[in-house]
Image (spheres, rainbow, N blue to C red):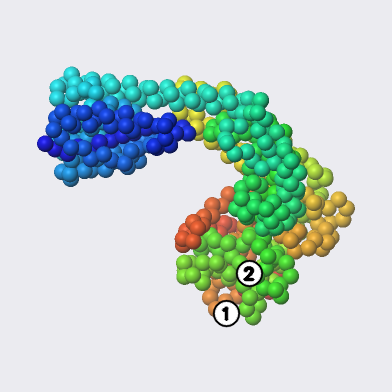
Amino acid sequence: MGTYAALVRVSQMGGRKVGSDRFHADEEQLAPMRAWAEREGHTLDVLEPELGVSGGLPLEQRPSLLQAVEGCERGEYDGIIVAYVSRLGRNVKEQLRVWERVEQAGKRIVVADGSVDTATSSGRMQRTIRAAVDEEQREAQGERLDARVAASVALGVWQRRQTPRGYRKDPDTRKLVPDTHADEVRQAFRMKGAGTPLADVARFLGMSDTGAGKLLKNRVYLGELHVGKHSNLSAYTPLVTLEEFEAAQSDTPRPPRSKNVDGPALLAGLVRCAACGHTMSRRAGRQYTYSCNLGARGCCNEWASVGMAKLDAYVERIALAELDKLSVSATPGQGVERARAELDSAKLGLSTYLDMVNAAEIGVEAASAGARSRQERIEKAQAQLRAELARSPAMPLMGTGAEVWESLDAHERNTLLRGLIAHVVVKRSGGRGSRTPLADRVRVLAFGADVAGPERHGSDPADVLPIPLPDLDADGVLGAVALGEDAA
């Protein structure tokens, strides 16, 4: 008499819930296992059912199965029992791993319906054949589901229960159509694009900041439908134009903490510490400085600090020079139109690729790599359009960039700089009293420069990812400016 771990697995729950009249899979699987245990004189330890769990997952992602296998290895169980072999899994490699570990521990796996008996060589062959058949069925089911999803996306069918704010689902076509909240959504995008802080936009919508942020990033308001790898770029009536959508993606600098400071810092959100890669913030003292946010927390050993007025003046000279270059060659809207054309071309490229490629012929990895490179082109084009939209209102139609610059307030200047500059990277000076020239420890990187920065993880300590200072004549570095007294 022994103890066996009884495993129940249901791959698709749909709308069913455990204990409801519509759900019987757990009892249907347990019945033959209990009959076997009673007949053979064994007891069952019924493990937590794996509900909504695919049989194609690796053992490490199957909590109850892993518990059963490790229990066999520790001698807690005499074996594992399942109702039929596909409940063990639908992945040949993973199934054979499970059988091998259990048998190496001197235990056994029982299939209650009697379809598999590994006591003989022919039984073991039958086990492998059954595993291969189960895997093929899983893959075929996935292909059928993918085909249904592709067809639904092509028709613009909204497949979720909840609809995005500003839309309702047409009961006949099951497509999204604008509803009575559509104008509110349009206004929210325009507010954010005009520089209204996210918190104020959220209050206007009656939503949380997080909810409003997600709304403003949802491309459904461009009329697009994306489900997994499938996309329909003209599924619905758009609520906003592409320009309005991209303008709303620009970050708005936080308001200053000090009540004595008028407007955001010129370089808010742009200055990064070279030692850790994190954003530097304005700090008050005998003079205002930009200082590394991780320095005070002891997480950055070579944290940087620089006088705000000196760095502002340094970067301002560079920015004005770039503005004057742009004003010589650009005509109003030309940059925006070029960026929009590139984005449209990139989207068409991805859509055409997905329509034409056959993953079965070229391989899944090759197909995924091709799609990924085209998606990266789209993301780059979106970023370029945001940059053009950010700086286009300040492009001088008459006069010089310097004259336009003088007419902008603090927020408008910061917004304009975000369309010209990716980062201002600052390296620590030589120490207290050191007068290291800014040109030796500051790099102004043009918008679009590929610089990987660390990511925050909630309240956990942030990662440290140093940014090496490139040479002054390197691609993407905007020209150094001699300012005289430019040491900090």
Judge by depth and name the residue closer to the eye, 373 or 27: 27
Q: Residue furthest right?
A: 398
Q: Amino acid at mark 2?
A: Arg
Mark 2 or mark 1: name the one nearer the start of the chain.
2
Q: Position of residue 475 (x, y in %)?
A: 62, 50
Quadrant housing residue 61: top left
Q: Residue furthest left?
A: 1
From what the image shows, is residue 342 above or below residue 417? above
Judge by depth and name the residue closer to the eye, 434 or 281: 281
10 Å neighbourhood of mark 1: few (<14), some, or many (≥20)? few
Quarter of the picture holding the N terminus:
top left
Q: Which mark is residue 282?
A: 2
Judge by depth and name the residue closer to the eye, 2 or 250: 2
Q: Amino acid at mark 1?
A: Gly
- Residue at horizontal 58 percent and vertical 62 percent from the top: 279
Residue 345 appears in the rendering: no
- Residue at horizontal 50 percent and vertical 58 percent from the top: 458
Q: Position of residue 241 (x, y in %)?
A: 74, 40
The residue carrying mark 1 is 433
Horizontally, residue 279 falls left or right of residue 98, namely right
- Residue at horizontal 37 percent and vertical 22 percent from the top: 136
Judge by depth and name the residue closer to the eye, 202 or 83: 83
Q: Which mark is residue 425?
A: none
Q: Secondary structure at mark 2?
A: strand
